Image: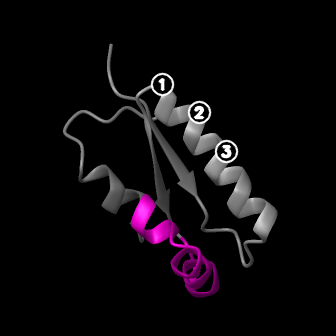
Amino acid sequence: KGTIYVILDLSELTFLSSPGVKMIGKHNNIIQSLGGEILIVGAKRFVNNILKLTGMDQKYKIFNTLDDAELLFDNLVLF
């Protein structure tokens, strides 16, 4: 039984609304209850600012690229 990592690729987003922030938080609670963690990748400048304003940058690991996120893991398998 391993840890669940969900990589949330935000590279195509140009805006992140309040309902979007809430949805990420809701799903994070579910994933954490299963022993997992959300990793956020690819957030552009405006979206990254929203992540900072909402404190999400303190709650989640945020990476510029998927390659950066993959460096954390020796045996990461993507589905």
Q: For the point 32% across and 62% down, which residue is it?
A: 68
- Dot 3 or dot 1: first in sequence order is 3
* Dominant SS type (magenta): helix
User: Is 75 situated left or right of 50 in this image?
Assistant: left
Q: Secondary structure at mark 3?
A: helix
Real-space Cα distance between discs 3 and 2?
7 Å
Image height of 36 relative to 7, above or below: above
**Which residue type carries mark 2?**
Ile
C-beta proximity under 8 Å, tags 2 and 1: yes
Q: Secondary structure at mark 1?
A: loop
The residue beneath circle 2 is 30
x, y (%) of residue 9? 57, 57
x, y (%) of residue 5? 42, 37
Image height of 62 relative to 50, above or below: above
Q: For the point 24% across and 50% down, which residue is it?
A: 72
Q: Secondary structure at mark 2?
A: helix
C-beta proximity under 8 Å, tags 3 and 2: yes
**Which residue type carries mark 3?**
Lys
**Which residue type carries mark 1?**
Leu
The residue beneath circle 1 is 34
The residue furthest left is 74
Q: For the point 33% across and 13% down, which residue is it?
A: 1
| Residue 54 lies within the magenta run | yes
The magenta region covers 43-59
x, y (%) of residue 40? 49, 59
CA neighbours of label 1 inside 10 A, class few (<14), some (14 to 19), many (20+): few
Q: For the point 72% across and 78% down, which residue is it?
A: 14
